[in-house]
Amino acid sequence: MNEHEFLKTLEERAQEQEKILRSMFLPKVFLSVSSWLGNHPWRILIPLSIIFTLILHFILGKNYSEFILKIFGKL
């Protein structure tokens, strides 16, 4: 495959992706959220992990440490 064919293939794929995005429900919302999460995933992942940890710690109490050790002890 030469450079011309490669660029042509890339352009075709880009056009296909653009058609898919335009046919989606609420494309503007999807594009803004996906670009925001793509650039800053830690803004969602870190708060979610803290909330999830607090919920599990509240539910399991002292058994939380044992639960986490069982999960990561098998890795």
Image: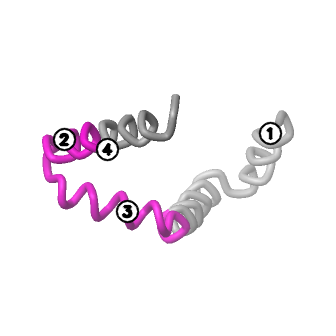
Q: Residue at x 61, y 60 (%)?
A: 53
Q: Residues within 10 Å of mark 4 (few under 14, many from 20)?
A: few
The part of the chain drawn in magenta is 15-44
Q: Which numbered tag is attached to residue 61? A: none
Which image quadrant: the C terminus? top right
Query: Which of label 3 and label 2 is nearer to you?
Result: 2
* Amino acid type, mark 2: Lys
Earlier in the chain: of badge 4 and badge 3, it is 4
Query: Which of label 4 and label 2 is nearer to you?
Result: 4
- Element type at marker 1? helix
- Element type at marker 2? helix
Q: Is residue 62 left or right of residue 13?
A: right
Residue behind mark 4: 14
Earlier in the chain: of badge 3 and badge 1, it is 3
In front of the other: 31 or 41: 31
Q: Residue at x 18, y 60 (%)?
A: 28
Q: CA distance from mark 3 to mark 1?
A: 36 Å
**Callout 4 touching callout 2 (CB < 8 Å):** no
Earlier in the chain: of badge 2 and badge 1, it is 2
Could you tell me residue 27's position as x and y percent?
18, 53
Q: CA distance from mark 2 to mark 1?
A: 46 Å
Q: Residue at x 72, y 52 (%)?
A: 64
Q: Is residue 70 left or right of residue 47?
A: right
Residue behind mark 2: 19
Q: CA distance from mark 3 to mark 2?
A: 17 Å
